[in-house]
Image (cartoon, rainbow, N blue to C red):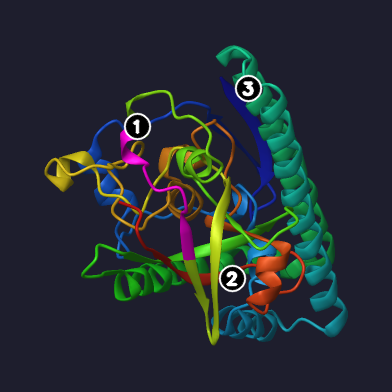
Amino acid sequence: MEITFRLKTDHWLYITFTILAFFSCSSGAVCSKIFDSADSEEMFDPWIKGGVLSYLFTTADDKIKNDLQILFNNLDLNSEEQNKLKELGLYEAKFIYEIKKKDYEWRDKNKGSSNNKKEIHSTNINKKLVDFQSEIDESVEDILEDKYAKFRKWTRNWWKKEIQFRGKKRKVLMQIGPALEITCYVFATQFDLPSVAVALPDKYIKFANLNWPILDYYGDWYQNSSYYVTVIRDEYILDAPVMDVGPWNEDDNYWNYAEWFSEGFPPYRRMFDELSLCMPEARAAFEKNYNNGLDQFGRQVLNAAGIDLTFEAAEKLGLGFLENAWVTVVFDNFY
């Protein structure tokens, strides 16, 4: 499947981009080298796929706030222009939230559907995302006018530095404790579930916590019936059960080692095992276009989220409605 769309370049020309809706990167060694290194020079223009404005304006992070101020100063944006960009960022965040919610509801109702029907559904979602990003792009160009080209150049340069910064923090904060607890630095988004809980991209964790049967041999890996994580954001600390699956994938247990690395001690990372420990597939897809920027369902990834927080959990971590954050997550007793 292919989705083709057009986006204006800095020189007022149109370039055609194609999203290949299948899994690429067949060589684990190459994938790891290109997409999992904080120092990789393999970069792309983040503006093309979307999610940049919502990341800038809905991420509760001191560095991001400082980056925004630098952007405003470099482009000499007045308060009206700044507010209009912020409104677009919030608009984009709500759109991403709504389209993911509707997709989750569709997949929940169509679990037994054929793979072809699911692929068509993912293609339709990607088309909506393409149209939406074109709308955002045109709106930004209308707001910035002759500053638009400078804005695009700034986002490309800023993106490279941002990815390097977050990659270094991931390596610094990642820990393996004496009882095999894993500590990961990941991006957190929000979802709607009436409780204090989180979602992780592992359907079997959800099944185990809800006492649902795991019918294949993976059941032997999930003997714990009370999977909790500890989420830390600045001075906030929250222990929360894993009660759902997401934010993007459902077979990406990134807190487990790949089978080729763990020397026969399961559970292993079931998918995307060329990525290193604590690197969610969605993050690699969003940051460096890993897997052509798609999740395991072929959907375009629009943020780097490795954990979803319920609204109540987010509030306890000091976050507002649909406000995202980089957090530290401790996975204890996940073996």
**Which numbered circle lies on residue 111?**
3
Does the magenta segment cover residue 224?
yes
Q: Check the image and report above or below for 173 versus 264.
A: below
Using the rendered view, name the quadrant where residue 307 is placed.
bottom right
Q: Which label lies toward us, 3 or 1?
A: 1
Front one among 72 and 273? 273
Amino acid under label 2? Answer: Ala
Disc on the earlier residue, 3 or 2: 3
**Category of crowding for the residue at label 1, using alpha-carbon neighbours closer than 10 angstroms: few (below 14), some (14–19), many (at least 20):** some
Q: Residue at x 21, y 40 (%)?
A: 259
**CA–CA distance in space, label 3 to label 1:** 19 Å
The answer to whether the residues at label 3 and label 1 have Cβ atoms under 8 Å apart is no
Q: Residue 87 appears at what percent x and percent y? A: 83, 67
Residue 146 rendering spot, x and y as whole percentages: 76, 68
Badge 3 crowding class, 10 Å Cα cut-off, few under 14, some 14 to 19, many 20 or more, is: few
Question: Which residue is identified by label 1?
Answer: 218
